[in-house]
Image: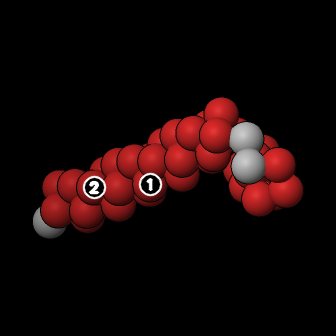
Amino acid sequence: MLKDYMWNLFQNTGNIKSYILYRELVEKENTLREERISFEQTATTNIN
């Protein structure tokens, strides 16, 4: 996975660009998870 690769690259080299990309991937992942949860809650609410 790209996220794991970037984290390992940062740990092994200290390359700040790899850390920045890693953080962007983590944030995007968290945002998508929150959107999915919100969508599921809305879908459940609209059924009733």
Q: Mark 1 sits on what residue?
A: 30
The label number, if any, that marks residue 1 in the structure image = none
Taking the image as shown, residue 34 lies to the left or right of residue 48, namely right
Q: Quick one: 26 or 18, which is closer to the camera?
A: 18
Label 2: element kind: helix
| Mark 1 crowdedness (10 Å alpha carbons): few <14, some 14-19, many ≥20 | few
Compare residues 35 and 14 and report the one nearer the observer.
14
Query: Quick check: marks 2 and 1 in contact, CB under 8 Å?
Result: no
Three-letter amino acid code at disc 2?
Ser
Decide which of tag 2 and tag 1 comes sooner along the chain: 1
- The answer to whether any part of residue 4 appears in the image is no
Horizontal relation, residue 14 to residue 38: left or right: right
- Most extreme residue toward the top is 17
In this rendering, position of residue 24 left or right of residue 9: left
Position above or below: 47 against 3: below
Q: How is the image coloured?
A: secondary structure
In the rendered image, residue 34, in percent from the top left (x then y), is placed at 35, 55
Q: What residue sits 57% from the left and 39% below the top? A: 20
Q: Is residue 20 left or right of residue 38?
A: right
Whether residue 31 is visible? yes
Residue for badge 2 = 38
Q: Quadrant of the C terminus?
A: bottom left
The local secondary structure at tag 1 comes to helix
Measured Cα–Cα span from mark 2 to mark 1: 12 Å
> What percent of the width, then of the height, locates residue 36?
40, 53
Which residue is at a point 22% across and 55% down the rendered structure image? Answer: 42
Q: Amino acid at mark 1?
A: Asn
Where's residue 27, x and y in %? Answer: 46, 48
At x 17%, y 62%, the residue is: 45
Q: Residues within 10 Å of mark 2 (few under 14, many from 20)?
A: few
Q: Where on the picture, by quarter, is residue 18?
A: top right
